[in-house]
Image: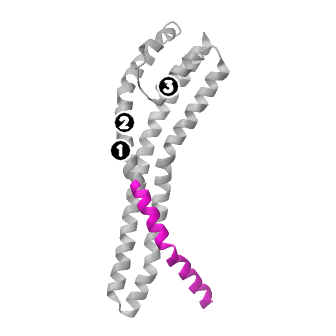
């Protein structure tokens, strides 16, 4: 039994460096996500007001002139799909495929946020528990410096993991609302086009 517990201890302490490296990568990815989210927020804010006004007044008679009123030179996912749907308005199969493509693209954009929200707490907890073993050993032997260092590592990994998870959770929630609103607009447009 003693050998088994020693093996488990060596495995867990051996995982500390990979966990810390992964937490640093997650932290860097969270910072990049904040920057890209801010840029996306500005783009969404710009197009959302225009699209809301257009879709509130859109009907079977005005749908044919919609391409002229769309914002030009934007790389917005929803605007791109609206333009593609208008090009294939006579094919219901193409419209359904474009709706599915939008769903896949939106899920791909949400993947980073979901990964951060799920992996941050996991790695943070691992980074907290792994140094606790050496900290307790240091406490039992009277090595206060070793115990303090391991406790510092434990708290730092927790904070970094929770920070990354918070960024992932918040950005994921906001983006999900954006994409849900866009999906409703695209479905409405598809229904209008198939009614004609």
Residue 80's label in the rendered image is 3
Residue situated furthest right in the rendering:
93
Q: Earlier in the sequence, mark 2 or mark 3?
A: 2
Q: Secondary structure at mark 1?
A: helix
89 in relation to 161, above or below = above
For the record, the magenta segment spans: 1-28
Instruction: Tell me if 178 is positioned left or right of 39 in this view.
Output: right
Residue 171 x %, y %: 41, 45
Q: Secondary structure at mark 2?
A: helix
Instruction: Tell me if 100 is positioned left or right of 161 in this view.
Output: right
Q: Which residue is mark 1?
A: 35
Q: Which residue is mark 2?
A: 41
Residue situated furthest bottom in the rendering:
141
Residue placed most toward the observer, 187 or 15: 15
State which quarter of the image contains the C terminus.
top right
Q: Secondary structure at mark 3?
A: helix
Residue at image x 40%, y 91%?
140
Q: Let me know if residue 38 is in the magenta part.
A: no
Give how far apart the Cα atoms at labels 1 and 3 are.
Answer: 22 Å
59 in relation to 115, above or below = above
7 in relation to 15, above or below = below
Residue at image x 43%, y 77%?
131
Q: Residues within 10 Å of mark 2 (few under 14, many from 20)?
A: some
Q: Which of labels 2 and 1 is toward the front?
A: 1
């Amino acid at each position: 039994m003693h050998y088994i517990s020693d093996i488990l201890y060596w495995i867990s302490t051996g995982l500390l460096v990979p966990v810390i490296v992964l937490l640093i990568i997650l932290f860097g990815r969270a910072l990049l996500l904040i920057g890209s989210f801010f840029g996306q927020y500005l783009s969404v804010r710009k197009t959302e007001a225009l699209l809301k006004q257009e879709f509130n007044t859109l009907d079977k008679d005005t749908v044919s002139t919609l391409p002229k009123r769309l914002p030009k030179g934007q790389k917005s996912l929803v605007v791109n799909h609206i333009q593609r749907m208008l090009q294939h308005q006579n094919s219901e199969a193409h419209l359904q495929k474009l709706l599915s493509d939008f769903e896949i693209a939106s899920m791909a954009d949400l993947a980073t946020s979901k990964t951060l929200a799920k992996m941050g707490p996991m790695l943070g907890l691992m980074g907290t528990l792994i140094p606790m073993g050496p900290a307790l050993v240091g406490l039992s032997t009277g090595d206060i410096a070793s115990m303090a260092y391991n406790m510092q590592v434990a708290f730092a990994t927790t904070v970094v993991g929770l920070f990354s998870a918070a960024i992932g959770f918040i950005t994921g929630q906001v983006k999900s609302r954006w994409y849900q609103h866009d999906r409703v607009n695209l479905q409405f447009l598809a229904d209008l086009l198939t009614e004609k």
